[in-house]
Image: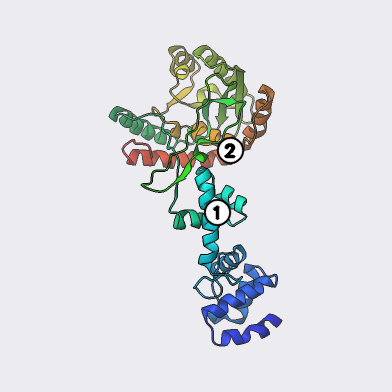
Amino acid sequence: MHYIDAFDYLIMDCTIEKLHFLIESLRRSGFNGTQIHKIMETSWPDNCLSLRRVQTICKEFKDGERVEFDDGRKMASGRTKSESRLQHIELVRNLIDENNSRTVQHIADTLNISHTMTQRILTEDLDKQWVHTKWVPHTLSDRNKTIRIERCTDLLEVLQGRLARKNLVTIDEKFFYLRNLNPKNTIGCWVTPGGDETVIQTARRSPMETKYMAIIAVSQMGFHYYELLSKNESINAERYIQFLANLEGFLKNIPHPILSENVRLLQDNARPHVARATIEYITSRNIRLIKQPPYSPDCNLCDRYIFNRLEAQRKNSFENKEAITAFLDEQLPLFSARRMEAALVEMERHMTQIVANGGNYL
């Protein structure tokens, strides 16, 4: 409470400068934003700032972003903000000139400045914006859009049933390359709108790179089954039917068994999935197939949810096939029923927007 006695005179004629001085003085004395707000709220309720505002001011002082004590934004060290920013602006500019694909965090870590300051320098002082390629699977024709609307509508209707929702099984294939690369959405560069900077180029993977295909099936109740093919092997209808037969046996032996006639199978339109032999097998086993819209990985839980998170969790290159197996055994059980339900709700919301948007990509 001795701080209250020491600062009472500041609050008698309250100004923004005095409030900022009080907050910074308490911060330097070891109090955090929440504690400072509690002191102010208890002792000077009529002049108290909001908790979030106090926490923001504390962070700005700590990061060197806050002005002296008024809104002229003079640094606590005595240098004006413009002088301090000018020094960092040139350093950031030099880093971007050397390599304009550096991320905000990489620049901040290199210069030992805050993420906030780096972001402001890039966007406000250097007038940069981050751009990266937006990947789409296919240029949609009018017919494609019409079918996307029809199948999204059908799928939304099917998922209203409790049994269909509970017994939904999603299948898809994914290649796991031994060599690790950054995800596509992290590869980009800083450019000036309308400027003439060269956009960074990056080479695609070679088709000859060592890779292993995994066929992955995930139940909406949180159970998973996968098979890893041989090196550089791809899938055909015969191999996919074999996988479906093995999956059927797996689903009969999980804690809450799913019989073939109750399975609602969601798969994309890859050739092995829609081959005549595959469809005949699915029909013979009384498995109910849910048709996915064409060119629509955004309407498949594996593509839009599971695969993205698997890539995000991958930090290093794989040494061999066994390393991929260990990775999948560790990560796939994390896709619990709760997480799958949240992902399904998000996909339903997405499909509703597709219908409203005339079948276009969002």
Q: Secondary structure at mark 2?
A: helix
How busy is the neighbourhood of tag 2: few (under 14 within 10 Å), some, or many (20 plus)? few
Q: Is residue 12 left or right of residue 145?
A: right
Residue receiving disc 2? 312
Q: Is residue 61 above or below residue 267?
A: below
Give the mark toward the camera: 1 or 2: 1
Q: CA distance from mark 1 to mark 2?
A: 31 Å
Q: Amino acid at mark 1?
A: Leu
* Residue 18 appearing in the image: yes
Residue at 36 percent of width and 35 percent of height: 153
> Which image quadrant: the C terminus?
top left
Q: Quadrant of residue 57?
A: bottom right
Q: Nearer the viewer, residue 22 or 98?
A: 98
Which badge, 1 or 2, is on the more N-terminal residue? 1
Tag 1 residue = 91
* Crowd tier of the residue under label 1, counting other residues whose Cα lies within 10 Å: few below 14, some 14–19, many 20 or above: some
Q: Residue at x 58, y 81 (%)?
A: 44
Q: Quadrant of residue 134?
A: top left
Q: Position of residue 6 (x, y in %)?
A: 67, 84
Q: Position of residue 308 (x, y in %)?
A: 54, 36
Rendered-image quadrant of the N terminus: bottom right
